Amino acid sequence: MNMILFMFTLSLLLSIALTTLNLWLAQTNPDSEKLSPYECGFDPLGSARLPFSIRFFLVAILFLLFDLEIALLLPLPWATQLEYPLTTLSWVSTILLLLTLGLAYEWTQGGLEWAE
């Protein structure tokens, strides 16, 4: 119990010391040069607050959606040791079939076309 209390106290003191040191040494004098958006060394040509195309968000959502299959399929090697491995195989096949159908649907709807 003493070791846990010691580690907790040490981590708390170290966190407080580093935070205090950061606040004490940080430079808080921003100027217009530091606040301007960086565009490869050139002066900004227009406003930095232009809205993004919705295509960027759609591609990001599609990536996250289809990236979930990795999280769902990672425990598959350990699932073969279960009592009924065929049930696991059928669920995995169902998940992959749904993801493949979703990809085909997005492809036919033009969701993956970047330029029109």
Image: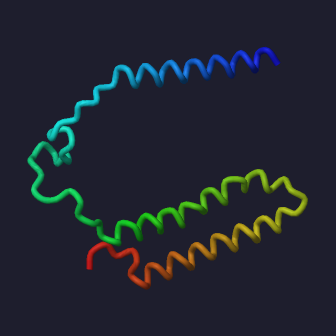
Residue 82: give x, y in percent of width and height: 86, 56
Residue at x 48% of width, y 21% of height? 18
In what quadrant of the picture does the N terminus appear? top right
Count numbered badges in the picture.
Answer: 0
The correct choice, above or below, for 39 with respect to 48 in the image is above
Q: Nearer the viewer, residue 22 or 113?
A: 22
In the image, residue 116 sits, relative to residue 42, either above or below, namely: below
Q: How is this picture coloured?
A: rainbow
Q: Identify which residue is drawn at 39% across, 74% down.
A: 112
Question: Which residue occupies the extreme bottom position in the image?
Answer: 109
Residue 40 in percent (x, y) is at 16, 45
Task: Give percent across and percent down for residue 68.
Answer: 59, 61
Q: Residue at 41%, 24% (x, y): give it.
A: 22
In the image: residue 111, left or right of residue 32: right
58 or 76: which is nearer to us? 58
Measured from the top left, where is residue 93 in percent x and y? 69, 71
Residue at 38% in and 81% down: 110
Q: Quadrant of the C terminus?
A: bottom left
Which of 10 and 85 lies nearest the eye of the viewer?
Answer: 10
Classify residue 37 as left or right of residue 53. Answer: left
Q: Is residue 46 left or right of residue 106?
A: left
Above or below for 115 versus 31: below
